[in-house]
Amino acid sequence: MAKPKLAIYWAASCGGCDIAILDIEARILDVADFFDVIFWPVAFDFKYDDIRRMDDGSITLTLFNGAIRNDENYEIARLLRRKSVLLCAFGSCATEGGIPSLANLFSREAIIDYAFRKAPSLDNPNGIIPEPVYQVAEGTLTIPEMWNTVRSLGQTVDVDYIIPGCPPQSDQIVAVVEAVIDILANGKPLPPKGTVLGATDKSCCDECKRQRNIKKIKKFIRPFEQVLDPELCLLEQGVVCLGPATRAGCGAKCVSAGAACRGCYGLPRGIKDQGAKMASALASVIDSNNPEEIDGIIETIVDPVGTFYRFSLADSMLRRAHQ
């Protein structure tokens, strides 16, 4: 019998999700043994036309990582949705827009102008801006046209499952892959559509072993500014840790190593907005009832939007209207 077909694709992302797949080490052989990997541009020389020629619904599973940043991302997202039985948003950028969606704080024109006319490291004396379509002697050159608004995969096409993380943890990838292989090999029922795989309904704080003493703080700090207590909750030491506003599943690895949770595993059940949840959590540790003093304490937070919405801006209540 023919093997189930697997596609892996990256859109607007850093490539870390593809590396995370390789980080499952010898288990990658189980994947290669069970699936026919028919599309993985970062690893093999596949062409888009190879997928266009396939029958609709002929790909069993697609792991799609990266946000939708330009018209090429959009075209391939729609193509893979049409060709796939199951489409999985893999990693923070696909599930919530990720770090690329912080570009939504600016317009496309402002970003292009800075990148090609004002950036300190730039060597472009004529201020030339790349054009989506350009005529040369050999013919017509085209490059993807950048969108004004970065979207998550789910804001673009219908998504069946979500695997969160920046990147997803390798042990969770192994668990998901083994579960999928078991389901497909033995005819077991699939999880309900929309299920978040490789995570739980709890928060990262529930996995964290640090002690919480309900300590009040007078200012927020960055981890390098003082020696931190390895046993005490980072938030209670003044470090902005997004554990209260982030779903569990990663094993609290960052927090255990002394690095604050960045929020990459997305929202726990029942929370609508990561930044709003963090505002509530911070209010519980600020040691003041004086509005002016509270404003001063809040001002010690460096880059609030980039901190509270580092991975979730595109999918938050602050999302920009699609343009």
Image (cartoon, helix red, strand yellow):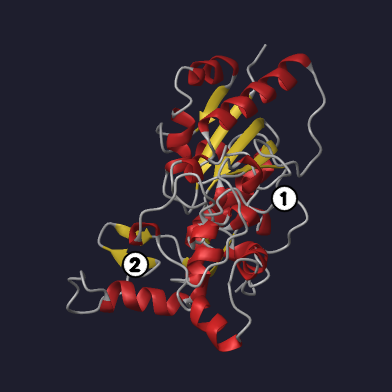
Determine whether, in the image, residue 21 is placed left or right of residue 151: left
- Residue 70 horizontal/vertical position (percent): 50, 61
Q: Local crowd at mark 2 within 10 Å, few (<14), some, or many (≥20)?
A: few
- Residue 294 horizontal/vertical position (percent): 56, 81
What residue is drawn where x is 64% and y is 56%? 245
Q: Distance between the residues labelled 1 and 2?
A: 34 Å
- Residue 139 horizontal/vertical position (percent): 32, 59
Numbered mark located on residue 18 in the image: none
What residue is drawn where x is 60% and y is 44%? 164
**Position of the N terminus by quadrant:** top right
Against 251, residue 119 (above or below) is below
Against 323, residue 232 (above or below) is above
Which residue carries the number 2 mark? 134
Residue 178: which quarter of the image? top right
Q: Which amino acid does label 2 sit on?
A: Tyr
Secondary structure of the residue carrying tag 1 is loop
Secondary structure of the residue carrying tag 2 is strand
Look at the image and tell me whether residue 49 can be seen: yes
What residue is drawn where x is 72% and y is 15%? 185
Against 264, residue 40 (above or below) is above
Count the marks: how many? 2
Which residue carries the number 1 mark? 158
Against 24, residue 105 (above or below) is below
First of labels 1, 2 by sequence position: 2
Residue 62: which quarter of the image? top right
Q: Local crowd at mark 1 within 10 Å, few (<14), some, or many (≥20)?
A: some
**Residue 178 versus residue 56: which sits nearer the camera?**
178
**Residue 105 versus residue 49: which sits nearer the camera?**
105
